[in-house]
Amino acid sequence: MADAMWGTATDDGGPGQDASRLSADKPRERKVVTAMFVDIVRSSAMVAGRDPEDADDLLLSILNRVTEAVPRFEGTVTQMLGDGFLATFGAPGAKEDHALRACLAAQDILSATRDEQGRPLFHIRIGISSGDAVAHVVSNGLWTDYRAVGECVHMAAKLQQRAASDTAQLTRDTLDLIPVGVAVRPMGSLRLSEEVEPMPAFLLDGARAVRRTATDLLSATTAPCVGREREVAALFAMADTVEGGTPVQLLLQGEAGIGKSRLVGEFLRDPRSRRWTLLQWPQMPIRRLADPDDLEAVALSLAEQVAGCASEQGIDWVCEAAGRRSGSLAGDAVRTLFGRPSLDPLWTGLDTAQHLSLGIEGLVGATLELAAPLRPCDGTGPGGGAMDGVVGRPLLVLVEDAHWARPVMVRLLERLADALPGSGSRLLLLATRRPPPLGPESQEQGWNGRPGGRRMELGMLSAEQVQSFLAHWLGSDWSLVELKAQVAARCQGVPLYLEEVLRTLEATNAIEGAPGAYRLIDPLVVHKLPRTLHALLAERMDLMTLERRRLLMNAAVIGTTFDVGLLQALTGMPMTKLSDCLAYLERTGFVLRTRLLPNLEYSFKHALIQEVAYATLTKSDRRALHARVLEALRHRRDHDLPNRLDLLAHHAFMAENWPVAHLFGRRAGERAESRSKLEDSSRHYANALAAVRRLPDHPRNTARQIDLLIALPRSLLPRGSMGVDDHLQRAIAMARDSGDLIRYARACSMLASFLWTFGDLDQGLALCRDGLSALDERDDRRTRVQLLFRLGGLQTDKGLFVEALKTFEHGSRMLSTSRPYDRYGLATVARVHMGSLAARGLAELGRVGEAVEAGRQSVEIAEESNHLFSRLFALTHLGWTHIICGQLEESIPALEAALSVGHAIHAPLLLPLVMGGIGYASVLTGNHKSGFAMFESSFALFQQQGAMRGKPHPLGWLPQVQLWYADALGVAGNRPEAVTMARAALETALLITQISSQARAVQLLGRFGIKQEILS
């Protein structure tokens, strides 16, 4: 069991490099890893004819040589084979850069195949692939093995088999996880089986231990830096201070992905930065053996900056500058960093510690010299004027990721910061760093700035800034409204999280288009977790003890917000210990306390942390834990756990307890629908439907399935959804086959409602009458009311106003006075549905006073019912009624209120009509600009909602908006376009057999002088 180790876990979560040393109680977990297979080429020929001991010695000597690179980059050798091995990076301890580490290790392994003269000692081939894997220690008493199983492991093995001798190949999945640092060449593709898509493969040409820096971001994106205007201004104010002759030390701190490098990039992008010299000293948590050490790297950066490359000219200047500023011995220390002999005879008598100190002093002196203002009589050292463009300019020393600075680099930065005051150098020492990974519980690492230096803390973007960010990336398409809300909730103001989630949506074809002009294609992919973020967040989690990490994972099972009582029941931890652990998780920035009464609740600081913690659990562990949460929920009550019903539905479904999942899923869907929480109701109904389909065949379960096949489309209708035909046709067929006439009538009614919006009025009318006929044999008052009111709505839309009013009057006599807000299976309160449509019909018949009164009463009933979609429906039809009655100014407040409600509950079905009404009333009351803009939005939403069917949706209301637009164009004096739009309205009305709109279109064309239009 996933959490069987409570109280016994003592490991620190750190990565192991040798599987044989891993604790046997390591739980089975899902990880995002990079697998690397290494094989000795022609090993059989190497051992052929040899004594077994000699063969073993030979192969072991090779394996020992090539495996040395794995622990160097914090990987784990998980399997030793006779002539090769499997290594994993990112398990058992997660690493945010596991893919780069594997490539660096592969490059070092390839280098190990040759001697110092470059001659081959033996030959190997390597395959590298990244992806999801299940990793755990397996032991049966006789042997212990660390297993990593997943598609990526097999893909790595396949790549190794096809790689040429002394080469490494990697997959696209690995390459996508490395933003910078590798050079590759395409090598075709491969697949594990015929059932899966081929995976592109690449030859690894080289790898460097580097990370994406501010200058990389500068060239990679042209997107605006949102929400950092104040910080950018502060940075330039400091730059002005430096240019005035006062050096400044600035520490820019914020969590991973908060935008530190992007902020620096904004400084570098500005034209004012072109008069500065940039000196970059990026820090890395890993380093190859062949890489220069910290002081050598700093010396090389100075030489390259002065001369454009590490030439003799640049090296001479750095050495002499170090000597001038810090003394001859410091100059000799810098010479030795470049591999040059010392000049001062005292140098050879100094020990290593003194050499190091003098090297630091020399580099600090050279850096200050580079930033010192030139005096007219000064030379610039060797080369003279050749370096005038660099030496003496304001200098930005940029130290990115200072939390990874090693002790020597920390000493250098400390010394440079100490030397700034009074130096006269125009130097800005800017370091970026993350806060400690576990907050105050972590030991401070790297460089944290000197006391008295300036600090700038970067926080998360505000909700408004996030929306601005998303608007720039995605655009303003109406299909993106819910997507933006979901992305904002998941990423919670961290720019990197936002960018990676959006890139994942694009890569998985969930959205299509171009930057700033996307639209949603596949909403089911929205919740896919980017692997880049998985590794970043999982590494922080893995720094905790196993007990605390498992507690976080158990909390993730409950949800992004979790009740402490439920968590205690789930884990079995004593409350005192649980409180201590939660306090620790709060201090380390994983969770926040969000409620004290009526129940103590915590929430994950970031929704993505919850996603990563949950994704780490295996599927079997998740099911078992959900079952335990479900059992704990049965002992709670609604008054102390307000969302208990939603939790029961969710955990029953995730525990695969299908009878309970159906029961509570249906109830939760009904409650959410009654509150106009349309997305929640759709999700609960869909889960309940999936659950009941897994129950045994039985007449009762058939009836339940029909009910849900009707309920799910009903919750989708206000959201403008169209793909419900299969559900409703199946419901009709199942009801017919089972002889259930009442459910047959309900299914016909629901399908008629969708046909109404599709503009298929005649078929909708026929279905309503068919349903009413079915009720003649076995009557059901609620179903009959539902059918009569839908029939009246279709008659109203067709233009049969007198018949519609009679139908409504007939249905109203069946309404129960004891339940005034009952919906009778409709999407709105029945009285609101009837009254709103009757108001429109009365207005069309010229009964103005009755129409307005009916519309207002419907709005009042809707408001009393607290059912928001009913309120949207009533306000829309009241505004429409006012327009028909010529009361244009009175229509605008009602329609604007409807628009606001529609946005609030994410119910766009009626909004094209609402926008068209606002546009028409605005133009005719003199506000042409905003009115025509509203028309534009209306037609755009018609098209966007109908993209699935390739025609506008809801088509049933398109002629009315077209007529309004034509009339508005005529009022504005644009007769040609007005005639064109009136003709389009007539064509649409003829297509959907809408009598009243046909007549109005002919009348409008007559006003424009088009007399020959006739109806066919």
Image: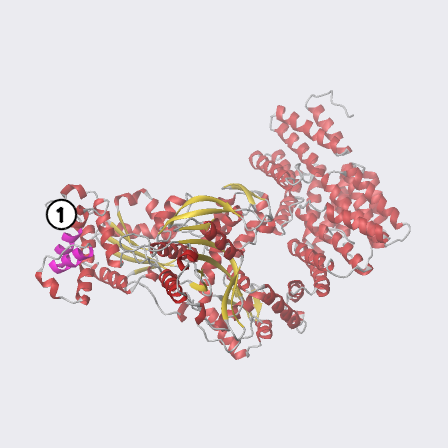
740 is higher (above) or lower (below) than 938: below
Which SS class for mark 1?
Answer: loop
Between 557 and 210, which is closer to the camera in this rendering?
210
Between 180 and 449, which is closer to the camera in this rendering?
180
Packing grade of label 1 (10 A; few <14, some 14-19, many >=20) is some
Q: Where is residue 20 in the image (x, y as percent from the top left)?
A: 45, 70
- Give the labeled residue for mark 1: 381
Res. 723 in view: yes
Residue found 79% across the figure and 59% down from its top:
697
Give the quarter of the figure containing the N terminus. bottom right
Q: Which residue lies furthest to the left in this view?
A: 345
> Is 615 on the left-hand or right-hand side of 324?
right
> Is 453 on the left-hand or right-hand side of 566?
left
Start-end of magenta stretch? 318-337
What secondary structure prevails in the magenta region?
helix
User: Which quadrant holds residue 402?
Assistant: bottom left
Say how many tags the image has.
Answer: 1
Res. 493 in view: no
953 is higher (above) or lower (below) than 260: above
> Is 278 on the left-hand or right-hand side of 145?
left
> Is 720 on the left-hand or right-hand side of 767?
left
Tag 1: amino acid: Gly
Q: Where is residue 853 in the image (x, y as percent from the top left)?
A: 75, 46
Examine the structure image and report whether residue 121 is included in the region drawn in magenta.
no
Residue found 79% across the figure and 46% down from its top:
790
959 is higher (above) or lower (below) than 552: above
Examine the structure image and report whether residue 326 is included in the region drawn in magenta.
yes
Q: Position of residue 708 (x, y in %)?
A: 74, 55
Q: Which residue lies furthest to the front in this view?
A: 49
Q: Position of residue 506 (x, y in %)?
A: 52, 46
